[in-house]
């Protein structure tokens, strides 16, 4: 009886089995082109690039010790970290307040404000950095305005300073922060804030104890986006920082394409990859732990 | 959430929007200035700087390259990204989890590192033509958009509709084209737009992949800026902004702009 059943099932199951095999084939076949593309064109090239840094005659870590011992190279790394951290901090505060205001707006005004934030985001990095050349330049708007008022006698040199890079970076990344946070803030249930208010909480404690914890995961996502974006940027430090304000991105390019020091460039690349991926991993773990809705 | 806003917060937000939009207005203004140097407010109004772009062969050529790379790269990334997004959603439990991480790697790896690695391995290592490297590099750079954005629309797609079509005898590819694809149309359009915009504005990857005679528009603009500081750059920037306006109009017409906050 049992044998007969298995046999029948086998006969009946044949098409189902075929279907299963086909599904298996389909799910691998469908993901295969993208998988091959990423592995072949991204993973292998990047891993090989990093691998070349360990193949020096002077020892596997010699390029790294050289990097960490060189005052100039460490200054570039510190400057990059500093610019990225300051940019992230400013973008967090500015983005949060603006997103908070946008989230309170009635429908139509809200969409207009979102459009106004999206538009710069969709405009290219080169164009947006270029605007600051016109604003901060020797013959720029600020200098012309200050001179015509008579506040200064000679044009200030504001370009190619850390300040000019940070201003342009904040300009670049605030829209990203706003858009990340508007979604998060809109997702906070109204009842929670009403509950806090009706129980007598003042605005500031409500903000600190209700809104901020609920927005924390979003703030972390935004911070990661802005930090990694500014840490690895190229066009903005190139245009507004120049040689004087070299950052990791421009330093990598200079080593690779101007001095043709490919091992040096690969070392910079490796350090950038490790810092970016490290920050993303640590922060995403933190975001998961901080999410009060997940408990 | 909707509470009353403190006037100070409102004023702050207005200042932020001024900060976001004023630089773009300044670019438009200086593109129209009838001077040989960049200045704002414009002194005299002229369109000659726009005419000047079309006379400069380098801008025309690189604009065409940029357009070709963006279209081919976006097409390629959708071609491999949509099937992957489909499989990830359809067979979620049966596929390993690292696969979805793999497809966002191009966002995780710094662009400038990716560009350098591509130059070393593809352009120089394999000796592929610069144009091919550009297309391939851009396609990979924007693959996460294809997979994630299309994936987001597939996540709300009811696969039982597809099974109904299949059980009624519709072949798999036809089912996908006539049942699945129309349902995830919004996601595909959104992915296309984000990918196209990212590609056409890209600097960090392209900066390594330009060779003799081949360059993209943003790279050409950067190179021009290092030598000249005339309103031509401002007018090229205005044209690029017009592309963005066009794209946003398409988004508004097809999806509504609020989808961008999701």
Image: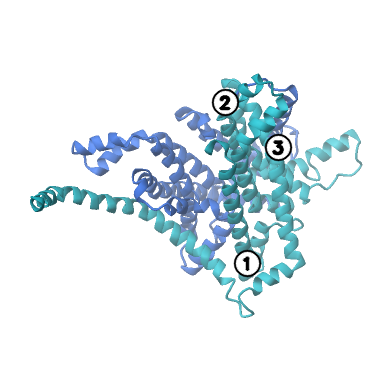
Q: CA distance from mark 1 to mark 3?
A: 34 Å
Q: Is residue B199 left or right of residue A3?
A: right
On screen, residue B142 above or below B49: below
For disc 3, the marked residue is: A93
Calculate the distance from the C-alpha at mark 1 to the C-alpha at mark 2: 45 Å
- Chain B as rendered: colour: blue
Instruction: Please state which of the two labelled residues, at mark 1 or mark 3, is closer to the viewer.
Output: 3
**Which chain did the image draw in cyan?**
A
Density class for disc 3 (Cα within 10 Å; few <14, some 14-19, many ≥20) is some
Q: Where's residue A149, x and y in %?
A: 89, 33
Is A13 left or right of A43, judged from the image as shown? left
Crowdedness near tag 1: few (<14), some (14–19) or many (≥20) residues, C-alpha within 10 Å: many
**Secondary element at tag 1:** helix
Using the image, tell me which numbered label, if any, was put on residue A111.
2
Q: Residue furthest front?
A: A1
If you read the primary sequence from the N terminus, does the residue marked by circle 1 or circle 2 appear first? 2
């Amino acid at each position: 009886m049992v044998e007969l059943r298995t046999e029948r099932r086998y006969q009946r199951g044949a098409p189902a089995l075929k279907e299963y095999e086909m599904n298996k084939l389909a799910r691998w076949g469908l993901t295969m082109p993208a998988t091959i593309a990423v592995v072949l064109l991204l993973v292998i090239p990047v891993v090989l690039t990093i691998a070349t840094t360990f193949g020096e005659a002077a020892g596997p870590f010699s390029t790294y010790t050289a990097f960490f011992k060189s005052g100039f190279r460490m200054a570039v790394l510190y400057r990059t970290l500093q610019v990225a951290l300051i940019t992230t901090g400013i973008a967090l505060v500015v983005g949060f307040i603006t997103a908070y205001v946008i989230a309170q707006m009635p429908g139509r005004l809200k969409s207009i404000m979102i459009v106004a934030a999206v538009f710069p985001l969709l405009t290219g990095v080169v164009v947006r950095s270029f605007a600051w050349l016109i604003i901060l330049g020797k013959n720029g708007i600020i200098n012309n305005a200050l001179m015509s008022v008579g506040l200064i006698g000679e044009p200030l040199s504001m370009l190619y300073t850390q300040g000019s890079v940070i201003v342009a970076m904040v300009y670049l990344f605030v829209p990203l922060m706003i858009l990340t946070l508007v979604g998060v803030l809109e997702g906070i249930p109204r009842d929670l804030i009403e509950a806090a208010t009706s129980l007598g909480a003042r605005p500031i404690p409500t903000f600190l104890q209700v809104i901020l914890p609920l927005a924390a995961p979003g703030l972390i996502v935004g911070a990661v986006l802005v930090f990694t974006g500014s840490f690895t940027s190229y066009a903005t430090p190139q245009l507004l920082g120049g040689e004087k304000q070299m950052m990791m991105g421009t330093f990598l390019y200079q080593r690779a394409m101007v001095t043709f020091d490919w091992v040096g460039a690969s070392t910079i690349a490796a350090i950038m990859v490790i810092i970016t991926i490290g920050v993303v991993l640590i922060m995403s773990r933190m975001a998961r732990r901080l999410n009060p809705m997940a408990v | 959430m909707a509470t009353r806003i403190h006037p100070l917060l409102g004023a702050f937000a207005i200042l932020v929007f001024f900060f976001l939009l004023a630089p773009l207005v300044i670019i438009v203004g200086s593109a129209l200035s009838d001077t040989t140097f960049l200045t704002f407010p414009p002194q005299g109004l002229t369109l000659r700087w726009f005419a000047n772009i079309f006379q400069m062969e380098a801008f025309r050529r690189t604009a065409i390259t940029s357009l070709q790379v963006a279209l081919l790269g976006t097409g390629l990334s959708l071609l491999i990204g949509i099937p992957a997004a489909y499989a990830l959603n359809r067979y979620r439990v049966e596929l390993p989890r690292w696969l979805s991480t793999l497809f966002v790697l191009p966002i995780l790896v710094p662009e400038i590192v990716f560009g350098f690695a591509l130059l070393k391995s593809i352009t120089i290592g394999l000796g592929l033509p610069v144009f091919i490297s550009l297309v391939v590099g851009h396609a990979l750079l924007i693959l996460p958009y294809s997979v994630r954005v299309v994936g987001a629309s597939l996540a709300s797609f009811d696969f039982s509709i597809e099974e109904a079509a299949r059980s009624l005898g519709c072949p798999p590819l036809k089912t996908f084209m006539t049942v699945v694809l129309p349902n995830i149309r919004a996601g595909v359009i959104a992915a296309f737009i984000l990918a196209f915009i990212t590609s056409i504005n890209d600097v960090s990857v392209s900066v390594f992949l330009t060779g003799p005679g081949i360059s993209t528009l943003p790279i050409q603009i950067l190179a021009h800026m290092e030598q000249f500081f005339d309103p031509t750059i401002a007018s090229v920037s205005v044209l690029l902004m017009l592309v963005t306006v066009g794209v946003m109009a398409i988004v508004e017409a097809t999806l509504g702009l609020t989808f961008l906050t999701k």
